[in-house]
Amino acid sequence: MSAPFPAPIDSSTRYCAVFGHPIKHSASPAMQNAGIAALGLNWRYLACEVHPDHLREAIAGAKRMGFVGVNLTVPHKLLAIEMVDALDTSARTWGAVNTIQFEADAPGNVATRGFNTDADAITRSLQEDLSITLRGARVLLLGAGGAGRTAALKLAAHGVGELHLVNRTESKAAAVAAEIQQRHPGLKVIVGYPKTEVDLVLNATSLGLRLEDRLPFDDKKFSLRQARAAYDMIYRPAETPFLKAAKAASCLTANGLGMLLYQGSKALEIWSGQTAPIAVMRAALEKNVYGH
C-alpha cells in the first residue's frame, strides 16, 4: 500500500524505521506510513534488515543520520536494553525495548531513549480480539524470549490465575518464572505444559513465520483441544499452522495484527507527540496483510 503523502521526499524529510532479522514479512511500513501521512508529517518509515551482531552500529547510524526513532522486532528487543542511553519506565518495567526515540538532551547532542509499547498492546489485543478476561485466566505461554518474557510479565501483572511457561531452552522459561514469582509471590507459575484445560494458549515464538515451520508446542505433551482460545503474535502469514490447528480444535483464534497496531500506534505517538490515527493505521494494516 502506498501512503497518500501530500509531498514528495525532499531535503527536510526525516526517517524512522523498524530493525529486524528477518524483516521482509513486516507490515509496519504500510501502517506507519499511513499514520504519518494522516498526521501531515514529512517523514518516511523504512524496514531494515539488521543482523543482531550489527544492531549497536545500526542504532548509532540512525542516530547520526537524524532519524526520528526506530522500532525493534525479533531478535533485538532484549539486546537493545544495553544499547540505549536511558530507559523509559515501560522498558524498565517489562525488561525489553521495542521503540527507541532520538532526542536532543543538549545542544549538539542526541540521546537514545528506549520504550516498551508491546506489553500494553498484547493485553489490549487479547481482550479486544478474543474477549478474554485475563484476571484469573489459565494461560499457556509458548516462548520466553523478548516478546514472550514481556507477555509473561504483563499477564502476571493482570492477575492471571495460572501461567504455564514453555520454551525450547527450559532454563530461560525458569528464569522468567523466577522473576514473576519475585514480583508476584502469590501467582501460580509453572514451567511446563498444563495437564488440564486452559483459557488461552499464546504463541510468542517465531515458529510460524514460514508455512513449513513445525508447531510451536509438543503435541505429545499438549493438545489444542485443552484450550478455549489461541493467539499467535505472528500476523504474516495471517493464519499460521498453529492458528489453523487451533481452529480445527474449535478454539477461538486471533493473530498478532492487533498487537502490531497498538504497539505501532503508541510508538508513533511517542515520536510525534500527537494522537495516532488508529483507524487509518488499522485499515492500512488490513489491506497489507489481508488484501482488503
Image (cartoon, helix red, strand yellow):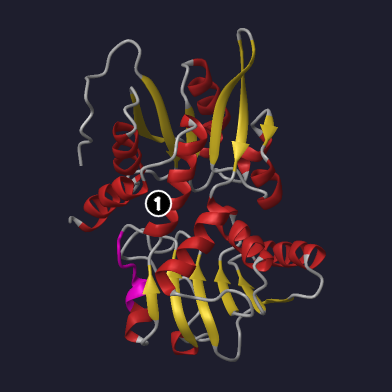
| Towards the viewer: 8 or 207 | 8
| Whole-percent x, y for residue 149 in the image | 63, 59
Residue 241: within the magenta?
yes
Residue drawn at 48 percent across, 67 percent down: 126
Q: Quadrant of residue 164?
A: bottom right
Q: Which residues are magenta?
A: 237-244
Residue drawn at 43 percent across, 67 percent down: 128
Q: Establish if 131 lies above or below 110.
A: below
Residue assigned mark 1: 261
| Towards the viewer: 209 or 3 | 3
Q: Quadrant of residue 85?
A: top right
Residue drawn at 70 percent across, 62 percent down: 176
Residue 187 visible from this viewpoint: yes
Residue 109: within the magenta?
no
Residue 215 visible from this viewpoint: no
> Which quadrant is the C terminus positioned in?
bottom left
Q: Residues within 10 Å of mark 1 (few under 14, many from 20)?
A: many
- Asked whether, in this view, residue 180 is left or right of residue 245, the answer is right
| Whole-percent x, y for residue 186 in the image | 80, 75
| Towards the viewer: 133 or 117 | 133
> Which quadrant is the N terminus positioned in?
top left
